[in-house]
Image (cartoon, coloured by chain):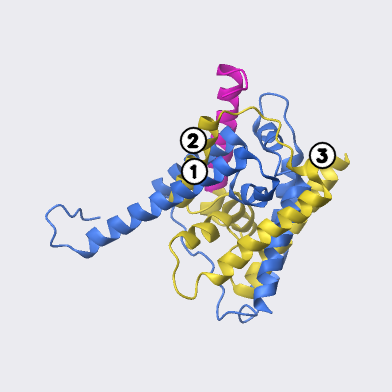
Amino acid sequence: MPAFIVFLAGALFAVGLALAGMTQPQKVIGFLDFFGEWDPSLAFVMVGAIATYGALFPVVTRRKGPVFASLFRIPERRDITPSLVGGAALFGVGWGLAGFCPGPALASITAGSGTVFVFLGAMLGGMGVYSLYGMFRDARRAAPGTADATPT
Amino acid sequence: MLETVFFPLLGGVLIGLSAIAMMAFLGRIAGISGIVSGLLVPRAGDTAWRALFVGGLVVGGLAMLLARPEAFAITVDRSVGAVALAGLLVGVGTRLGSGCTSGHGVCGIGRFSRRSVVATLTFMATGALTVLVVGQLFGGTV
């Protein structure tokens, strides 16, 4: 039952993305084109999604816990860091360049476009490289005896 | 009106419902970049739900492809190199910045997270700047 519901949630997400126009990169680029022929439709996607999530979030998290897990995993960090801003900035450049973000690209995979395959391959590569870098950094931190370990 | 207001609004509501279902049933933030990247370095007991959600995303996309193939039309002109660079920036950027349009833009803003508001404003600003540069300096094709 939990498996089916999670699968269904993923499917619902994809249906929403496709219906909203997020799987058409020209619509995303049109939305980001504030100084040209601005396409406002993605603003309505954000309004619909944020209003729905925002209205139901307090109702859902008032319960003792989620239905199939022990606790709500809600990010607690509040600090604005260079990583947060720098990462978001890089993501925005990529988003504006191709008109794809991770969700719509994955939902478009069966459409068979070369653009989507190239984008997803590079995206997974970027994520993988970042994970490897993270593991390398953590390993160094865990071994303080190494000569060039940098304290942070 | 239907294409620019109603469908986007309805699609947004469905995205919001899916995301809140992930919180209600699993207690998880429905951030696509986070869910996918967790699959690249699998940890015991933390893989099945991610794979199921991504599987649903792909199958839901396929269902929409069959119902509304025009929803997957790509008319922008981008070279393979530009698309690859874009994917790389999205991959690295979403990990460094702890989220993308879904995690920060929907779930984060929906619960008034300061970090997510800053991240969303940032990626919308650099996205708009990129579109401006591509349009003005490269004539809309890169």
**Amino acid on which disc 3 is placed:** Thr
In contact (CB < 8 Å): disc 2 and disc 1: yes
Residue named by callout 1? A122
Which secondary structure class fits the magenta region best? helix
Colour that chain A carries in the picture? blue
- Whether labels 2 and 1 belong to a single chain: the reply is no
Bounds of the magenta span? B118-142
Q: Residues within 10 Å of mark 1 (few under 14, many from 20)?
A: many
Q: Which mark is residue A88?
A: none
**Amino acid on which disc 1 is placed:** Ala
- Spot the yellow chain and give its letter: B
Q: Residue at x 61, y 22 (%)?
A: B135
Residue B95 image point, x, y percent:
46, 51
- Which corner quadrant holds the N terminus of chain A? bottom right
Q: Residues within 10 Å of mark 3 (few under 14, many from 20)?
A: some
Relative placement, left or right, of B136 versus B81 is right
Q: Which mark is residue B4?
A: 3
Q: Who comes first in sequence, dot 3 or dot 2?
A: 3
Q: Residue at x 70, y 32 (%)?
A: A30
**Amino acid on which disc 2 is placed:** Leu
The answer to whether residue A14 is seen in the rendering is: yes
User: Is residue B131 located in the magenta-colored stretch of the structure?
Assistant: yes
